[in-house]
């Protein structure tokens, strides 16, 4: 097993700690002393009180009392496996990133899929986006792709994230999921329309975790040594296609087998039918971005495949089930800020917030030394000046805790890339530094925001998709008690397409609604407007 290999190589733990056969072991206390009688607590006589000297019993109970760690604040229910990424195409015309510039290069991967809103025991077939988090172990550190199975997201202003998530979770008083709360928020924040149409189509209920695509959603940057770069969006297209359930089947499975996704992933890999994805990228030059119809940093929009064609990059294959779910999946800590030279985040404010949020939550969920946990440990040696803290396992031996002249660390400077020297390239500086508009531009909704959801409804979906969308939304919106929220939500859908709104209204017995009043598309602040405000600092 690759994972066991990493475990023993990096943690220097005796191999006895990681075996998975149950028969060779001698039962011991946590300090390794053999115990003759596992099921007996020491007591005085046959009916007397217990003894404090019984370390075996105290060890057992005290550890049990501390078995739980916090579940993830979102994406708590998940499933995962190991595998590999293999580069199949050379991208050296647009990036100096080693992983993407030598065909045949492989990186071992750990992948965790998840639903978003539910708790750790919730149903795998719930209507929800799915997380698709990938850790690639490269010679230049770990690269995490913390993606979803939808190409867009509900928001583009990170200040909304905790509010939005709270509306998808439980009501503070009733401790129930609440349709009023759900639609109250969404109908007031209509930039979510694109994602909502995807969520309430059958793509909101995928058939298992491995029969779906993955998308960066965000714009990233691929950088070259000479300082030039392109914007990029990353797609993982499931080789077996995107398989979905209709609402009735998903609902039935949620009751009969809430762990359907975990089970089907595990059994598929055990049967050696290894799930695989083809990795593609779309790219856009900075000049193209300035003339793009939408803001290239707006996570609620997709890039047309016609204008920005899909370019193949590599393969992702899952070929190894875990030996220990907690150690290999629950303790996995993914973050968009775990990146490698020449693949950089864009200035998308949601992405920028995520760069902070993930390591922050890991320090809370797993501790300050979370990256020393075997599943998170890079395959390359880590050398820096971080020391000590709870559970410091790889504390870097006798290496000085500062940059000494006796044993200095080498700094690798990558030209052009952010993970090295400061970027001094004129064009990057010009393109990226701007002032003004920052408070309101991404919160402002205009008619432009309904174009892509409308195209999805009118042009991409077929009649069956549209029928399912209407009944899926009606099934949920019908639970809303407040007539005001119902009416506003119907207006929200009318802004996408009047017939969509009217069909939902009919299904829930509500009056027809007019579209929301929003500014015309011409008043949207575009990326170009940002760039025009560019100043050189
Ligand atoms: C999980 C925050 C948006 C994908 C999480 C976690 C946090 C978080 C705190 C829990 C991580 C853990 O405990 O290990 C945020 C914030 C966002 C945001 C603050 C926006 C401001 C997104 C977006 C995507 C995404 C846009 C996808 C494009 C994921 C995935 C996981 C996750 C896949 C699960 C990772 C795993 O399997 O361990 N997010 N998130 N999130 N998020 Fe986000």
Image (tube, rainbow, N blue to C red):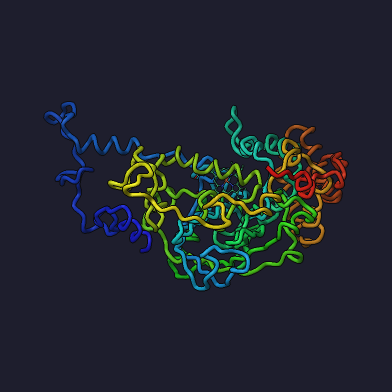
Which residue is rendered at x = 88% and y = 41% of the image? Answer: 514
- Of 329 and 473, which appears nearest the observer? 329
Left or right: 193 with respect to 404?
A: right
Up/down of 216 relative to 347, above or below = below
Up/down of 56 relative to 17, above or below = above
The x, y position of residue 510, in whole percent, is: 82, 40
Left or right: 204 with respect to 326?
A: right
The x, y position of residue 146, in whole percent, is: 55, 52
Q: Quadrant of residue 378?
A: bottom left
Left or right: 1 with respect to 97?
A: left
Which residue is rendered at x = 85% and y = 51% of the image? Answer: 499
Farthest-out residue, left = 45
Which residue is rendered at x = 76% and y = 38% of the image? Answer: 437
Which residue is rendered at x = 27% and y = 53% of the image? Answer: 13
Quadrant containing the N terminus in the rendered view: bottom left
- Of 376 and 97, which appears nearest the observer? 97
The x, y position of residue 467, in whole percent, is: 77, 56
Up/down of 408 relative to 62, above or below = below
- Of 457 and 292, which appears nearest the observer? 292
- Of 410 and 313, which appears nearest the observer? 410
Q: Quadrant of residue 92?
A: bottom right
Q: Quadrant of residue 388?
A: top left
Is residue 306 among what the camera can see?
yes
Left or right: 14 with respect to 150?
A: left
Is residue 124 among what the camera can see?
no
Up/down of 350 relative to 12, above or below = above
Farthest-out residue, front = 405
The x, y position of residue 187, in whole percent, is: 76, 39
Quadrant containing the C terminus in the rendered view: top right
């Amino acid at each position: 097993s690759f994972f066991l290999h990493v475990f023993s190589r990096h943690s220097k733990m005796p191999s006895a700690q990681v075996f998975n056969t149950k028969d060779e072991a001698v039962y011991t206390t946590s300090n390794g002393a053999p115990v003759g009688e596992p099921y007996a607590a020491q007591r005085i006589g046959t009916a007397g009180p217990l003894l404090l000297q019984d370390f075996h019993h105290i060890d057992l109970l005290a550890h049990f009392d501390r078995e739980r760690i916090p579940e993830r604040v979102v994406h708590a229910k998940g499933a995962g496996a190991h595998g590999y990424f293999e580069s199949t195409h050379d991208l050296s015309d647009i990036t100096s990133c080693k992983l993407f510039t030598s065909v045949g290069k492989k990186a071992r991967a750990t992948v965790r899929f998840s639903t978003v809103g539910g708790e750790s025991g919730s149903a795998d077939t719930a209507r929800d986006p799915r997380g698709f988090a990938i850790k690639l172990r490269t010679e230049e550190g770990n690269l995490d792709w913390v993606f979803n199975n939808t190409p867009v997201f509900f928001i583009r202003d990170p200040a909304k994230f905790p509010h939005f998530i709270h509306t998808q979770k439980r009501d503070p008083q009733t401790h129930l999921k609440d349709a009023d709360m759900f639609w109250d928020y969404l109908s007031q924040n209509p930039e979510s329309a694109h994602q909502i149409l995807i969520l309430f189509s059958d793509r909101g209920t995928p058939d298992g975790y491995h029969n779906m695509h993955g998308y960066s959603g965000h714009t990233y940057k691929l950088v070259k040594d000479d300082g030039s770069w392109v914007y990029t969006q990353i797609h993982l297209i499931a080789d077996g296609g995107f398989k979905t359930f209709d609402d009735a089947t998903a609902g039935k499975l949620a009751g009969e087998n809430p762990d359907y996704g975990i089970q089907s992933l595990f059994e598929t890999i055990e049967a050696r039918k290894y799930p695989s994805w083809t990795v593609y990228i779309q790219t856009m030059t900075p000049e193209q971005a300035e003339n793009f119809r939408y803001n290239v940093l707006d996570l609620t929009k997709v890039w047309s495949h016609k204008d920005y064609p899909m370019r193949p990059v590599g393969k992702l294959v899952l070929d190894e089930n875990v030996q220990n779910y907690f150690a290999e999946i629950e303790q996995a800590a993914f973050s968009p800020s775990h990146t490698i030279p020449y693949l950089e985040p864009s200035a998308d404010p949601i992405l920028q917030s995520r760069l902070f949020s993930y390591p922050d939550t890991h320090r809370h969920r797993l501790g300050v030394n979370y990256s020393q946990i075997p599943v998170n440990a890079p395959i390359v040696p880590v050398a820096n000046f971080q020391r000590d803290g709870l559970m410091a396992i790889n504390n870097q031996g006798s290496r000085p805790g500062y940059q000494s002249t006796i044993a200095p660390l080498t700094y690798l400077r990558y030209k052009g890339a952010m993970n090295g020297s400061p970027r001094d390239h004129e064009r990057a500086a010009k393109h990226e530094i701007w002032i003004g508009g920052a408070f309101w531009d991404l919160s402002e909704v205009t008619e432009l925001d309904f174009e892509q959801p409308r195209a999805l409804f009118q042009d991409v979906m077929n009649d069956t998709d549209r029928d399912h969308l209407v009944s899926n939304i009606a099934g949920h919106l019908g639970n809303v008690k407040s007539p005001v929220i119902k009416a506003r939500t119907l207006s929200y859908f009318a802004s996408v397409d009047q017939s969509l709104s009217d069909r939902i209204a009919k299904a829930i017995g509500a009056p027809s609604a007019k579209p929301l009043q929003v500014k015309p598309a011409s008043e949207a602040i575009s990326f170009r407007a940002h760039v025009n405000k560019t100043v050189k600092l």
